[in-house]
C-alpha cells in the first residue's frame, strides 16, 4: 500500500512486549517499566490477526521486537505462526542476544530468517554500565549461538554515543573481518530516557568514516543504511543517520506496539488502536494509519527531542 506521499509501506515492526531483562540507559528507565495487565496487551490471536491484516495491505517484511522479545513466553509460537502467514516474505527479530544461547536454533526452526543483536561495546565494564545489569559474556555467547544456528543474515546494531563508545569504532568494525555478519552504527536518537546524555553524546556517523578511512562504499540493499566494507571483510559496515541525514523520504515502515497501537512514525505522538477489533477493523485501522504517515518526523537533535510520547522499549527498537 502507498501512503499519502507515494512511499510503498512494506515493513512492519511488531513489538511483542515492553519488558526486558536489561535496562539500557537510552531505552528504558533504571527501574524498568510497570508491567501492564494482560487485558491491556495484545493476545497472541490478536497479534496474528494484526499481522494478517497488515500483510493483506502489502506488508511483506515483519520484524519482531520488544522490549526484549525473547522474554516473551510464547515467542516461538508467535514466530512460527507469523512465518506461516501467506504473503509474508521475511521474518526477522531484534534482540539483545543474552537469551539466544538456548533459543537461537528454535527461533531458526520457527521461521526467523534474519536476526539483529544489539551490542554497543566490547568492554565488559562499559557493557555493564550501559545496560545497567548485563554481562557482556552472555551477549557474546548469544552471538556465537546465532552464528552456529545459521541464520540467513546476522546484524549487530551499535548505538554510537560520543564519550562512550566512539573510541571502539575500529574494534567493533573488526567483527566484520572475523565473522560473516554486518555491523551497523546508529546515531543516538533524543528519546525521553536520554536525559542523562549531554549534547556531546549525539555525534554524527561521519565519525565512523573518519575513524575507518579504509571503508569502501557498497551498493545499497534496499534498507536505510549506507553500506561500506573493510578490505577482506566477511560483512558490511552500515551507517544509519536518523539525526544528521534523516531518511524519511525512503521510510517504508510502520510499527505496532505490544499494547496494540499502530505508530505510523516512530517520532510522532499519533497512534491508532487496534486491540479488540476483528480482522476487517484492523485492516481499516492499518489503512488509516498508513495514509496518516507524516512526510517527515520534524527536527531531531540534542536540543529537539523526539515527540514519540513513549520510551523505545514501549515502541519497539
Image (cartoon, rainbow, N blue to C red):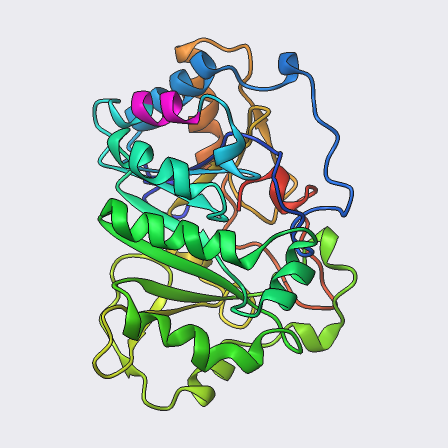
Where 175 falls versus 109 (above or below)? below
The answer to which of 293 and 224 lies nearer the viewer is 224
Q: In which quarter of the image is residue 189?
A: bottom right
Q: Quadrant of residue 272?
A: top right
Chief SS of the magenta region: helix
Which residue is rendered at x = 46% and y = 14% of the image?
46
Which residue is rendered at x = 26% and y = 68% of the image?
235
Look at the image and say whether residue 220 sits in the magenta stretch. no
Task: Report x, y in % for residue 310.
Answer: 68, 41
The magenta segment is: 75-81
Where 218 falls versus 211 (above or below)? above
Quick one: quadrant of the N terminus?
top left
Which residue is rendered at x = 46% and y = 16% of the image?
44
Residue 59 in sight: no
In-image side of 187 versus 108 (left or right): right
In-image side of 35 versus 81 (left or right): right
The answer to which of 281 and 181 lies nearer the viewer is 181
Task: Report x, y in % for residue 185.
Answer: 46, 68
Task: Report x, y in % for residue 206.
Answer: 48, 81
Look at the image and say whether residue 76 sits in the magenta stretch. yes
Amino acid at each position: 500500500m502507498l501512503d499519502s506521499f507515494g512511499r510503498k509501506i512494506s515493513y512492519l515492526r511488531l513489538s511483542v512486549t515492553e519488558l526486558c531483562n536489561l535496562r539500557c540507559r537510552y531505552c528504558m528507565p533504571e527501574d524498568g517499566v510497570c508491567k501492564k495487565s494482560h487485558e491491556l496487551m495484545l493476545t497472541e490471536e490478536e497479534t496474528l490477526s494484526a499481522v494478517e491484516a497488515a500483510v493483506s495491505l502489502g506488508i511483506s517484511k515483519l520484524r519482531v521486537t520488544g522490549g526484549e522479545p525473547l522474554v516473551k513466553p510464547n515467542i516461538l509460537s508467535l514466530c512460527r505462526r507469523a512465518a506461516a502467514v501467506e504473503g509474508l516474505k521475511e521474518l526477522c527479530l531484534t534482540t539483545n542476544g543474552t537469551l539466544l544461547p538456548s533459543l537461537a536454533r528454535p527461533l531458526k526452526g520457527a521461521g526467523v530468517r534474519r536476526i539483529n543483536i544489539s551490542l554497543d561495546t566490547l568492554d565488559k565494564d562499559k557493557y555493564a554500565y550501559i545496560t545497567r545489569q548485563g554481562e557482556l559474556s552472555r551477549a557474546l555467547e548469544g552471538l556465537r549461538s546465532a552464528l552456529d544456528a545459521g541464520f540467513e543474515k546476522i546484524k549487530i546494531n551499535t548505538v554510537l554515543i560520543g564519550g562512550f563508545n566512539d573510541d571502539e569504532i575500529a574494534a567493533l568494525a573488526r567483527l566484520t573481518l572475523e565473522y560473516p555478519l554486518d555491523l551497523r552504527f546508529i546515531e543516538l536518537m533524543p528519546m525521553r530516557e536520554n536525559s542523562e546524555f549531554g549534547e556531546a553524546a549525539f555525534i554524527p556517523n561521519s565519525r565512523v568514516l573518519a575513524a575507518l578511512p579504509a571503508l569502501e562504499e557498497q551498493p545499497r540493499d534496499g534498507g536505510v543504511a549506507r553500506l561500506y566494507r573493510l578490505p577482506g571483510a566477511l560483512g558490511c559496515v552500515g551507517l544509519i543517520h536518523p539525526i544528521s541525514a534523516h531518511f524519511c523520504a525512503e521510510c517504508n515502515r510502520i510499527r505496532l506496539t505490544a499494547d496494540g497501537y499502530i505508530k505510523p512514525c516512530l517520532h510522532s505522538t499519533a497512534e491508532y488502536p487496534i486491540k479488540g477489533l476483528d480482522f476487517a477493523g484492523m485492516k481499516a485501522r492499518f489503512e488509516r494509519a498508513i495514509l496518516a504517515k507524516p512526510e517527515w518526523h520534524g527536527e531531531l537533535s540534542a536540543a529537539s527531542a523526539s515527540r514519540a510520547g513513549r520510551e523505545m522499549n514501549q515502541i519497539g527498537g
